[in-house]
Image (cartoon, rainbow, N blue to C red):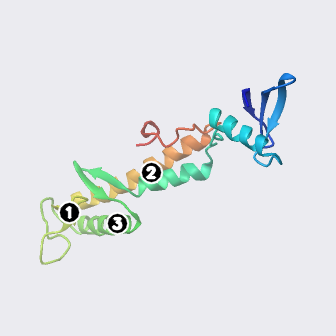
Amino acid sequence: MEFRNPAHNANGGIDCEINHPSFGWIPFTASPDDPSEAGREIYAAALAANPAPQPAIIPTRDMVNNERNRRMRGTFTFNGTLFNCDADSLQRITGAGTLAGFAMGAGAQAGDLFWHGGESPFAWIAADNSIVTMDAQTAFAFGQAAARNETLHIFAAKALKDMDPIPTDYAADIYWP
């Protein structure tokens, strides 16, 4: 059977016109639950010709928070090197930065790679698995950079959540550090 002008309705059916053999073009509501096979066939054909529109996703504050956390817990760049910044890494970076701050307060000199009291130079493993040695001043700055990475993401998320409405492309790089 011929149909034209299919449009989805609020009840899950499709309003259209069918070309009735005796009456010509008449209004018809096609439904997947139509008791007649012909009605179900018209519904299937109308759906194929006019697929149901996807509902618009309205971003929520929680969605922005999830994107913030994903980005914040990935990697960050320090002195041109990429470092992991997942929760465990961040805790270790914060600890190293704190230790470095105490060492600087106790007189650790720039260039001294043994400031931490260990038997080998202080080093950090980068995201690419390379070794990066750090004196106390560098380790302290490393901790500061990790904290700055967190802060920038937190405030970027706040700016997005303050928008009304939150942009549907909130996960785009343009909104994030």
Instruction: Report x, y in % for residue 153.
Output: 45, 49
The residue carrying mark 1 is: 129
Q: Is residue 133 visible?
A: no
- Spatial CA distance of label 1 from label 3 is 14 Å
The residue carrying mark 3 is: 89
Q: Are marks 1 and 3 in contact (CB under 8 Å)?
A: no
Corner quadrant of residue 7: top right
Is 8 drawn above or below residue 137 in the view shown? above
Q: Is residue 149 left or right of residue 64?
A: left
Which quadrant would the C terminus be assigned to in this image?
Answer: top left
- Spatial CA distance of label 1 from label 2 is 26 Å
Q: Toward the viewer: 123 or 81? A: 81
Instruction: Please name the residue shown 43% across and 47% down the image.
Output: 152
What secondary structure is marked by label 2? helix
Q: What residue type is labelled 3?
A: Ser
Instruction: Report x, y in % for residue 92.
Output: 33, 69
